């Protein structure tokens, strides 16, 4: 009997590769989460040291009011550490999936964006844990609020872990904005002059969005609007740099 030639179409090859990349990603996530959860108490202590250094007069322990509060905190910190550890691996899977269909200049562009994104993520985590979180805790706890006396004695575990993870995720998003803007500009290279004309309207839209997200407090609205404006300007600067880089590449090819 003659063997039948099985012809695999490009769409089938694409779906097979996507399927196996997804399987590898989920298996890596499960394995990394199990390892992180096994050492969750170590990660909890590592993040708790920040609070103990900021408040040296408190007892080195946290308050837990619910039976599952410690377990919930361990799961949260394990998920966050797992996502941080697997960020380069997921990047590698995406790159190996995309690079075969790219040109040489596009491959160089993707490598620059990928390395910069990973380094920005690590830098954002270090700055958040060692600089921003201690200063923010100092700022809020030494205000004349009802929460400050409780935190000065024994802070609650779930509130502290939720605060650190939320703050870290926000800083991770901010650190990835330049590289997201570079990717968007590569997909849709619109002229810089167009952004200059609609720039003020984007700022007004950011002000309306900040007013919608936190309507009662004017100061919080202004703070959120300033954050939006800073993020928009960071993306604008990165798009300008990308446009100059693309122009140089096109001149070099000519």
Image (cartoon, grey):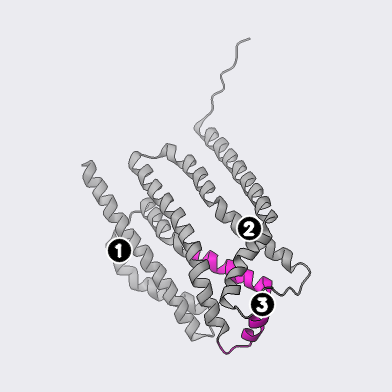
Q: Quadrant of the rendered structure where residue 2 is?
A: top right
Q: Quadrant of the rendered structure where residue 82 is?
A: bottom right
Up/down of 110 relative to 197, above or below: above
Residue mark closest to the camera, 2 vs 3: 3
Residue mark closest to the camera, 1 vs 3: 3
Residue found at x 54% / y 85%: 216
218 left or right of 157 in image: left
Q: Are marks 2 and 3 in contact (CB under 8 Å)?
A: no
Determine crowd level at label 2: few under 14, some 14-19, many 20+ residues with C-alpha closer than 10 A: many
Up/down of 205 relative to 25, above or below: below
Q: Judging from the image, what secondary structure is the residue with disc 1 in? A: helix
Q: Are marks 1 and 3 in contact (CB under 8 Å)?
A: no
Quadrant in which the N terminus appears = top right
Q: Residue under label 3, please give it.
A: 155
The residues bearing labels 1 and 2 have C-alpha atoms spaced at a distance of 41 Å
Sequence-wise, which precedes: disc 2 or disc 3? 2
The reply to whether residue 133 is in sight is yes
Quadrant in which the C terminus appears = top left
User: Which mark is drawn over residue 225?
Assistant: none
> For the magenta stretch, what is the residue range?
143-172
Residue 40, magenta (yes or no):
no
> Residue 49, image x and y in percent?
60, 69
Residue mark closest to the camera, 1 vs 2: 2
Q: Residue under label 1, please give it.
A: 194
């Amino acid at each position: 009997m003659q063997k039948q030639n099985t012809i695999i179409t490009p769409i089938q090859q694409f779906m097979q590769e996507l399927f196996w990349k997804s399987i590898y990603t989920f298996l890596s996530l499960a394995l990394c989460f199990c390892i992180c959860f096994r050492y969750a108490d170590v990660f909890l202590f590592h993040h708790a040291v920040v609070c103990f250094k900021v408040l040296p007069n408190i007892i080195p322990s946290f308050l837990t009011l619910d039976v599952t509060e410690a377990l919930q905190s361990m799961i949260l910190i394990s998920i966050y550490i797992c996502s941080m550890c697997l960020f380069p691996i997921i990047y590698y899977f995406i790159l190996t999936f995309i690079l075969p269909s790219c040109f040489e200049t596009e491959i160089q562009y993707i490598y620059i964006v990928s390395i910069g994104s990973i380094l920005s993520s690590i830098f954002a985590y270090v700055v958040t844990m060692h600089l921003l979180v201690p200063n923010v805790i100092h700022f809020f706890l030494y205000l004349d609020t009802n929460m400050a006396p409780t935190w000065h004695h024994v802070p609650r575990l779930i509130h502290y872990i939720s605060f650190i993870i939320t703050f870290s995720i926000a800083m991770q998003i901010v650190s990835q904005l330049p590289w997201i803007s570079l990717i968007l500009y590569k997909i849709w290279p619109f002229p810089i002059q167009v952004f200059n004309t609609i720039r003020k309207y984007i700022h007004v839209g950011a002000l309306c969005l900040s007013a919608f997200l936190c309507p009662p407090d004017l100061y919080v609205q202004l703070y959120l609007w300033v954050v939006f404006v800073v993020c928009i300007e960071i993306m604008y600067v990165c798009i300008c740099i990308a446009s100059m880089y693309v122009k140089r590449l096109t001149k070099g090819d000519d």
